[in-house]
Image (cartoon, rainbow, N blue to C red):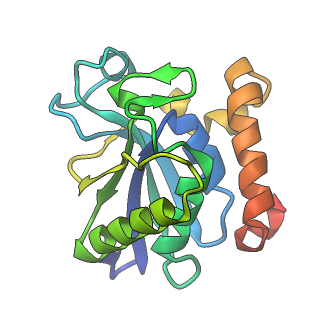
Amino acid sequence: MIDEKENLATATLAGGCFWCLEAVFEQFAGVERVESGYTGGTLPDPTYEDVCSGESGHAEVVRIRFDPARIAYEQLLDVFFAIHDPTTPNRQGHDVGSQYRSAIFTHDDAQHRTALAKIAEVETAGEWGAPVVTEVVPAGVFYPAEGFHQGYFRTNPAQGYCAFVVAPKVREARRRFTSWLNPSAR
């Protein structure tokens, strides 16, 4: 769905810790804003602690505002499937729980169809060696994460999780998708 006023579209993705996803996606040309938050559950206005408890039903997600004339939704999905393991239900590495599930929250029918086609493509390629468990569901209410989560990797690159988990994903995205990066990220 494109916001006619700004000519920007929205993608909402869950693939483990939102610090990783945010740090990766904000470096791409055409991505105007990446915001960490929560969606997919039933608890209104969840906190980080609510989501980490696993009781809220929400996933850690990023909401990406992007210019589809500069980067396509399908390209965002290519990056998404390259930087997380879409075959592990409710888990990414040592992060375990439904809040870390792999999910694509679609904003219109076109995104839904594109997401299903991309999953079929990923499974056919067999890169992961197991069935893709990524959920494709309509986007619901997005709740922004607390302020200290926004831009976390940029402001805390030496923090342990950032140095050992986030940074390698950022490096891998830069290596695999160099031509899509903002010039400043190359």
Quadrant position of residue 56:
top left
Q: Position of residue 115 (x, y in %)?
A: 37, 66
Q: Is residue 175 visible?
A: yes
- Foreground: 151 or 73? 73
- Foreground: 168 or 24? 168
Q: Position of residue 84 (x, y in %)?
A: 56, 44
Figure label count: 0
Q: Is residue 164 above or below residue 29?
A: above
Q: Is residue 156 visible?
A: no
Residue at 34% in and 77% down? 2
Please state, as top left, top right, bottom left or bottom right, where the C terminus lies in the image: bottom right
Q: Is residue 132 above or below residue 94?
A: below
Q: Is residue 160 above or below residue 86?
A: above
Furthest-bottom residue in this view: 69
Quadrant position of residue 104:
bottom left
Q: Position of residue 103 (x, y in %)?
A: 36, 47
Quadrant position of residue 82:
bottom right
Residue at 75% in and 50% down? 172
Determine whether, in the image, residue 60 is placed left or right of residue 185: left
Please state, as top left, top right, bottom left or bottom right, where the N terminus lies in the image: bottom left
- Foreground: 165 or 124? 124
Q: Position of residue 36 (x, y in %)?
A: 46, 41
Residue at 45% in and 35% down? 88
